[in-house]
Structure formats: structure tokens, C-alpha cells
Image: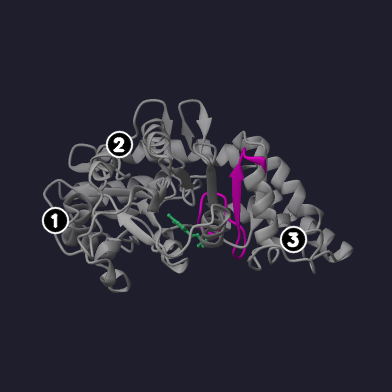
Amino acid sequence: MQFIDLNTQQRLIRDKIERNIKKVLGHGKYIMGPEVEELEEKLADFVGVKYAIGVSSGTDALLMALMSYDVEYGDYIITTPFTFIATAEVIALLGAKPIFIDIDEKTYNIDSDRIEDFLKDPIDSATNEFIKPAKIKGIIPVDIFGLPADYDRINQIAEKHNLFVIEDAAQSFGAGYKGKKACSLSNIGCTSFFPTKPLGCYGDGGMIFTDDVRIAKRLRSIRIHGKGEHKYDNVTVGLNGRLDTIQAAVLLAKFDIFSYEIDLRQKVAKRYSDALKDKFYLQEVPKSYKSAWSQYSIRPKKNNRDYYLRLLKNNNVPTAIYYQKPLHLQKTFNYLGYSLGDFPVSEKCSEGIFSLPFYPYINEKKNKLVIDILKKFL
Ligand SMILES: *Cc1c(COP(=O)(O)O)cnc(C)c1O
């Protein structure tokens, strides 16, 4: 059994993928070819926003989103410690400081009450000094494991404090929130096409979504070295942040079956949830939310993760732990001055959680095997 099997999907659409790639080999426009624009239009339409900008990765999407708001040295950005390093890394890259806020124990997403509490009396964790409110520029909520964060509340808080909101939707492309789609839930939505994400390509890639024409224009410039009228007219500091034409061609083939796959993901998740809810804490999907289920993660109620990991391993079932160490405890962020105990919910989840094999095409038999192994003990 594989943790994430990409081969079944490829077998279904291999012809189309090859045809699409051959088309690129034919026209030879490897950089910013027509497939990039076609994909941008299709995905903007799917997500329900005006503008989509194809970029080099999910990490670069987040970085460029921050650059489009002129985030710089001395600024602060609020985010969650229970996420992949990229979310906070891009803040630090620009010389700004991540402010971590603990998560909600049921959804594993940033806890909006705690954001409000923090903003009432914002203190720098390293210096213990009061942070001038104008230095706090934005919030990056993460839709962890594919489940959107609480955007109504978060956007409301952001508006009150004059902050932007960038949705880290690297794991949640295809997810839903109160009738809207992930990537459309705040000022800017950023996703990743890393191969194992819900919509993955065959290399690195990402996309940025926004309804703000000014931001879209800036992002198109930042994506190509801060270009103005043309490539050799440079009006701002940018980077080489383009999505490859060949990756766009692969994604076009995959996107045709994407909605079907999102439906399959709901079925797989339901099979796991129905069988495991008694003995494990599941990630709770609030009413009128829909997860893209990039990971299916559980926490044993008896807090005996190692037992289950061994049991599954002995039966050749692969698992993974997202995330072993919350970001405030990572060495790279020592300078932020956080320590063990600062974010008890994130720490508790990191100690108890693990993820099961999950992909749209996992069949009922394999699904049941994992469940049976987990239940033998129960
Ligand atoms: C994967 C991921 C990213 C980064 O995406 P890449 O395409 O790998 O650069 C950022 N944030 C989260 C939450 C992710 O899971």
C-alpha cells in the first residue's frame, strides 16, 4: 500500500497528459506558453475570483503575496505554528517576524479568539516589548489538511485592525466554505501544485488568486523580475516566479477530473470517519465547510500513537506525522523567543497526531484493511 498513490490517476488520464505535453513540445513556448493562461482562466473560474497568477511553487505564491503588500523588515505577520515550514519561512525571508497564534483543538486551524486576544495587547515574544499596531500587517491562516479556516471571523478581525489576509490554501484547493471555494476566502489565496497536493503537477508549481486588480497587476510584475512594460523594464524588486508551461499542460489534463476526485475524497474520508470516530479524535469539519482532504489525520483518544504506528508498520501500512514539531519549537525560529508550553494545543496535537494512507482512488478493500488493523486493538 502507498501513502499517496499517484499512479492510478495517471493511468486514467495518461493519454491526455501525453497529448498535452506533446503540444508544448510542438509550439516550444516553454516559458509563459498559452497553457499557463488557459489554466489561469479555468482555475480562476473554478475558484470564483477574477484573477489567477500561475507561479513556481506554493512557497513562492506566499512569498509573492507578501511582496505584493510590501511586507518588509520590522513588520509582523500573524500565523499558526501548526503548519508546514513554508508558511512562516516566507515571512522571515522578507525580514518580517512571524507571530504565532495557537490552533483550535477540533479543526487544527488558527484560533480566531486567540487572534483577537493577542491584538488587544500585542507583545513581541523575543523582546517583550509592545508592538506598534501599525507594524502588524496581516494574517496568514492555513487551511490545514485541506480544511478551510474560520474566514468570516478572521476577515472581520482583519478589517477591524486594518490587516490583510492571505489564505495558505496549499492543501485545500477544491475545498469549500459556506458556498465559496478555497482560494477565494480572503484578500489573496495561494495554492501549491506539489505532486501530492489535491491538484498536483509533475514538479513544482503554484497559483495565486485575488479579486484585487491592483494586487493582480503587481503579482504579474513580481513573477517576472518586477517587470514594467516589458522584461527589460524593471519597476519593482521581483523574482523568477513563473509556472512552467509543461506543468500547466499536465495540470490541464488533471483538472478535467478534479471535481470527480474531490467527490471521491469525501467518500474515502467518510469511510475512515465512520469507522474510527469512537476511539480517535478526528479533524472536525464544521457545518457548511468541505475539506479537500489533502491528509487524513487522527489522534488516538488513549494517547498511544506509537502503538498504532508500530501496528500499521508491521502490517505494511505507511503513515506520516504532520507535524512532528510545531514551528515555534523549530531551531530556525529560536530567535523569535518562543518556548515549550507557549502553544499547548499545537504541542498536544503534534504529540498525538498521525496521518493514514489517503488518495481519491484508495479502494474500499484497502480502506477497510487500514481500519481493521486499527480496530483489531480496539
Ligand atoms: C505544501 C505547502 C506549502 C508549500 O508549497 P510548495 O509548492 O511545496 O512550495 C505551503 N504551505 C503549506 C501549508 C503546504 O502544505
Quarter holding the C terminus is top left
| Residue kind at label 3, given as amino acid type | Thr
Q: Which is nearer the N-term, disc 3 or disc 2?
A: 3
| Residue kind at label 1, given as amino acid type | Asn
Dividing the picture into quadrants, the one containing residue 350 is bottom left
Residue 29 sits above or below residue 47 on the image: below
Mark 1: is the Cβ under 8 angstroms from ligand 1? Answer: no
- State the residue at coordinates (43%, 45%): 146
| Res 255 visible | no
Q: Secondary structure at mark 1?
A: loop
Q: Which is nearer the N-term, disc 1 or disc 2?
A: 2
Q: Nearer the viewer, residue 169 or 237?
A: 237
Q: Secondary structure at mark 3?
A: helix
- Answer with left or right where residue 235 lies relative to residue 281: right
| Residue kind at label 2, given as amino acid type | Glu
Q: Could you give the CA–CA distance between mark 3 and mark 2, rounded to whole angstroms?
A: 38 Å
Other residues around mark 2 within 10 Å, as few (<14) / some (14–19) / many (≥20)? some
- Answer with left or right where residue 31 lies relative to residue 107: right
Q: Where does label 3 land, which residue?
A: 245
Q: Where does label 2 land, which residue?
A: 284
Quarter holding the N terminus is bottom left
| Residue 166: in magenta span | no
The stretch in magenta equals 193-213
Q: Position of residue 149 (x, y in %)?
A: 38, 39
Q: Where does label 1 land, which residue?
A: 304
Q: Could you give the CA–CA distance between mark 1 and mark 3, rounded to whole angstroms?
A: 47 Å
Magenta stretch: dominant secondary structure:
loop
Q: Secondary structure at mark 2?
A: loop
Q: Nearer the viewer, residue 363 or 186?
A: 186
